[in-house]
Amino acid sequence: MTPVFSWSKNAYTAEQLVCILLGQYSEERLCISQPVNISHNVTFLVQTSHLKHPDDIKCDDMGSWKHNGSPKHFYCVTKSTKGITNIEPLKTKPSDPAEDIYELKRVYYQNSSDETIRKLVAKLEGTH
């Protein structure tokens, strides 16, 4: 079975994505392969280190996809012993990145056969 992170139809905000992607999760909540045969609005967390190539995340059984953009945004994340306390968006890429700066890249796709079918792949990278 493919572990589903969320069954919500609502899209996550950028700040919510940063928080989710910085979270610690049990192995049971993470996909170790690309989800296929998806027919519902769901969210998956994929452990990409288990994929043969990072681009394998794009492979599924849904036909071809049109790339509709990939905006990047930077965030300063403040953490404490209790977890994340603040996520502040930055207007520009910092010239001297610190350990608490992260880049969120969202890649949007639209199915070539049915434009109502869409997917979003979000990645978070530290800039240090």
Image (cartoon, grey):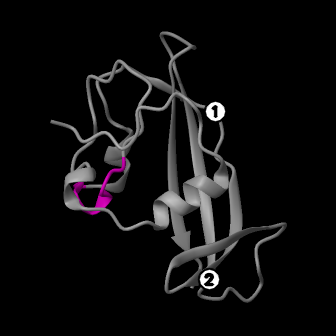
Q: What element carries label 2?
A: loop
Which amino acid, mark 2? Asp
Q: Name the residue under label 2.
A: 100
Against 41, residue 29 (above or below) is below
Residue name at image x 52 percent, y 27 percent: 9
Q: Please state if 102 lies on the left or on the right of 39 as rendered.
A: right
Q: What is the x, y in percent for residue 22?
A: 48, 67
Q: What element carries label 1?
A: loop
Q: Give the range drawn in magenta.
A: 45-52
Q: What is the x, y in percent for residue 106?
A: 59, 48
Label 2 vs 1, first from the N-terminus = 1
Tag on residue 68?
1
Against 128, residue 117 (above or below) is above
Q: Nearer the viewer, mark 2 or mark 1?
A: 2
Q: Please state if 24 lies on the left or on the right of 10 as rendered.
A: left
Query: 91 or 15: nearer the eye?
Result: 15
